[in-house]
Amino acid sequence: MDPLDRIDDIIAMVEAARSVPMSRNCMVDRGELIGALDQLRAELPGELRRAAALLEERDKILDAGRREADRIMHEGEQEHARLVSVNEITVSAEHEGARIVGEARAEAQRLREEVDEYVDTALGNFEQFLTRALASIERGRDKMHALREIGSFVPGDDDRPLPF
């Protein structure tokens, strides 16, 4: 079950709880509430681990992109140096080396942009999840405060306790 659904279940459990007469408190089955909170606690680390894994994946992709860019640039520089050493093609070698280095830099920039876009999308999705979770928590707190403001049921003169 999604952690947001679990939070909604806990809120519903508190909302459905019977009020304690003469107070703003309510009676909630302790075991049931603790069980629901334990399940929520068990689910949240998974979401957090998933976010950490996304960040780790982003770092790996960035590192791989940097290594690839460095490799391409190194190869370009080596090719450039080799071509420059030959006298009859010195001018064309300089142009070719510069072109290879330029392509390497362009490829490195393209890879960086792709990685940034991927990470931004993944973090945006996680941000939406957290925003929904915070909104759900806020609604639950608002309901709890509203119930607290309303107060609990107070029996009148003609209300008698139930015989059971």
Image (cartoon, rainbow, N blue to C red):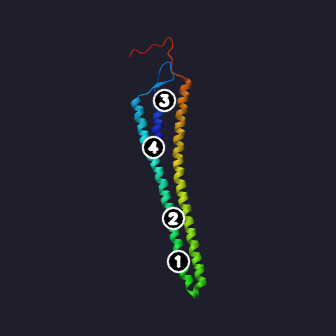
Residue 102 found in image quarter: bottom right
Q: Determine the residue positioned at 48% across, 50% down.
A: 51
Which callout, 2 or 3, points at the residue further toward the start of the chain? 3
- Characterize the local packing of mark 1: few (<14), some (14-19) or many (20 or more) Cα atoms within 10 angstroms: few
Query: Which tag is nearer the camera, tag 3 or tag 1?
Result: 1
Query: Which tag is nearer the camera, tag 3 or tag 4?
Result: 4
Residue 122 image position (x, y, % from top left): 51, 53
The residue labelled by disc 1 is 78
Q: Amino acid at mark 1?
A: Gln
For label 1, the SS is helix
The residue labelled by disc 3 is 15
Figure check: 114 above or below 12: below
Q: How far apart are the two marked residues, 3 and 1, measured between alpha carbons?
A: 71 Å
Q: Determine the residue positioned at 55% across, 24% down.
A: 150
The residue labelled by disc 2 is 65
Q: Amino acid at mark 4?
A: Leu
Q: How far apart are the two marked residues, 2 and 3, measured between alpha carbons?
A: 52 Å
**Residue with the most extreme bottom position:** 88
Would you say the residues marked 3 and 1 are in contact, meaning their CB atoms lie under 8 Å apart? Answer: no
- Characterize the local packing of mark 3: few (<14), some (14-19) or many (20 or more) Cα atoms within 10 angstroms: some
The residue labelled by disc 4 is 44
For label 2, the SS is helix
Q: Amino acid at mark 2?
A: Gly
